[in-house]
Structure formats: structure tokens, C-alpha cells
Amino acid sequence: MHNYIAVVFDNEGSAYEGLHALWQMDDAADITVHGTSVVHRNDWGRFEVDTKETHPAVATAVGVGIGALLGALAGPAGAAVGAAGGAAIGAATGGAVGITTDLVRADTRDQAGYESSFVIDAGQSAVIADVSEDSIFLVDERMRNLGGIVYRRAASDLRDDEWFDPDYLYPYEYIPPRYVAW
Amino acid sequence: MDAKVKDALDNVRASAQELHAAISDAAAKRGGAMKVDLEIVQKKAKAVADSARSSMATQNDAAKKHLGEAVKRLEAVQKDAAEGLKATGRTFQSAVRKTLADARASAQETSQAVASKRSAKSKPKTNGK
């Protein structure tokens, strides 16, 4: 199964542990990770994306894409919100996503039972990942042990989404220097 | 699942990921330094494409298809980088963005090839043996 997942954690440090765990599972060939990124929601409700901050055009592109991807993950209603948020960060720093995905529901589309909309509350962080997995249980269990809650949408479903573009996830484990503790 | 044994396909994927990281890092540099990096990128992309081609024969059909797409994207990386070396200003920036996008796509395709291989290995045998 090719899925997009959002794993929500209560803090940034746990999110990076979750990110590292996903790539460890890839290294063990338990799953295949195609791309990842980490987003944070600050106490004022704004989203921030950890980017490499290399060339401004590249950094901004990552931020814009994550905005759209968050919206797509949140479901049909969230897609429009995500697109608007993406445009907003394009004009801003490339790191902040001005969208609200709370309470966005994906119940207007016929989806598999394991899929659900997701919520990132203020102060929480989430790992966004593009993965191939033969079973959902391996990721669910590992993330649960780290304190994360996993939300999924099938890649086949997201591909139909007008705003969906997977290219904004890093295709390797990118951890900003301030989080490197392993 | 058959884990911990890195084969040629895993190495191709790792090289494609490294290529994307190298281009992303190069994009942070100024014109002259970035152009030096683009020359290296061209050579790396060719090496990864050659490795991808040579590993295709032993893969299943799904993995072969993804590797074929990866090779096309890696050839595009070489072309984009060559254009970047000749260009200046906005054309140069555009070439760098295209180089990065094609490198990202090649990493995605090689990763999909790895997923196809792993999925095929994990499926239970159906002949009862």
C-alpha cells in the first residue's frame, strides 16, 4: 500500500524521534519511505515547516508544497484551505503555513476505513511522510510507542487532489542541526 | 521481510538521494561556486543512471518500470545541469530548480522501485511449498 501519513506528536523532539524511527524502519526494509518533512504548530496556531533554508526559492517551494499537502491530507475540505495556506507562505518566509486544519473532515469522499482526517493542535508537531507499507500495524505500533498518533490517506486518493504534489518532501532523512541528538 | 542486505537497487536509491541532497546544498551557494557543483552533479547523475540501468535486469517488472523512469529523470538532470552551466541570471536559477525537481523525481522513482522489490519479497508463496 502506498500511503501518505501524518503522525502527530505533542512536541518537536518526539516528532524528530518519530521521523528517525520511520527511516530506521526503512533501513530495516520493514517499510519504504519515499519522503518526509516535519511541521510544527506554534502557540498562536501558525504552522511552521522545517526546511533546509538553502536557496530561498527552494526553501519557499518546500513550504508551499507542505501547505498544500497538509490540506490534501486533511481531506477534500482541507485541500482548498491548504492551497490558500500554500500561497500565503509563498509570500512569506517559506517556513510558516497559515492554515487551520482543525476539525476538517474527509467524510465527503468514499475512503477506506483506516483513513481519517487529522488535527494538529497548538504546540504539537507532525511528521508528514510518503510511505509504502505492506501492513499499517508496524508503523502504527512504532509511532504509538513514541507517543504519536498516525493518520493516513491512500496515495491513489491524494493523486486526484488538485493541489497534491509529493515533490516537496525530502527524499532522505533531513533533521535540522538543532534537533540532531542521535 | 528480507532485511539488512543492501543490494544494487538499494545502492542506486541511496545514490539518487545523495544526488538530490547535493543539488539542494549547491543551490545555497553563489553563482561561481554553484557552477562548480553543477559540473559534479552532471557526473554524479550519469554514474547513478548507469548504475540504475545495470541493476534493471535482475528486478521484477514493476521495479524495472520505475527504474526506467528514474533513468529518464537522471538524464534530464544531466541536461538541466548542462544548461545551468551555460546560463546566467534567471535562466540559471530556472535551470537549478529544474535540476532539483528532476533529481527529486529520480529519487522518488528509485524509491518506488525499492518498494516494489520489497513488496514482492514479502508476499507469501501461493504454491503451497
Image: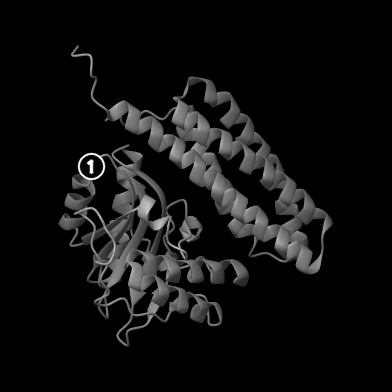
A37 horizontally vs B103: left or right: left
Q: Looking at this view, is A8 or A11 the one in front?
A: A8
Residue A120 sits in quarter: bottom left
The single residue placed furthest to the bottom in the displayed view is A44
A161 horizontally vs B128: left or right: right
Q: Position of residue A71 (x, y in %)?
A: 38, 70
The residue to which callout 1 is attached is A135
Of the 4 image quadrants, the one containing the C terminus of chain A is bottom left
Can you say whether A63 is above or below A19 in the image?
below
Q: Position of residue A141 (x, y in %)?
A: 17, 50
B50 horizontally vs A144: left or right: right
Q: Residues within 10 Å of mark 1 (few under 14, many from 20)?
A: few
Residue B123 sits in quarter: top left
Q: Look at the numbered disc 1 and give the secondary structure of its residue.
A: loop
Residue at horizontal 31 percent and vertical 50 percent from the top: A22
Coloring applied to the structure: one colour
Residue A113 sits in quarter: bottom left
Q: Looking at this view, is B81 or B127 the one in front?
A: B127
Q: Position of residue A140 (x, y in %)?
A: 20, 52
Of the 4 image quadrants, the one containing the N terminus of chain A is top left
Q: Amino acid at mark 1?
A: Ser
Q: Is residue A55 visible?
A: no
Q: Position of residue A126 (x, y in %)?
A: 31, 66
Residue at horizontal 48 percent and vertical 75 percent from the top: A86
Can you say whether B124 is above or below B70 in the image?
above
Q: Is residue B67 visible?
A: yes
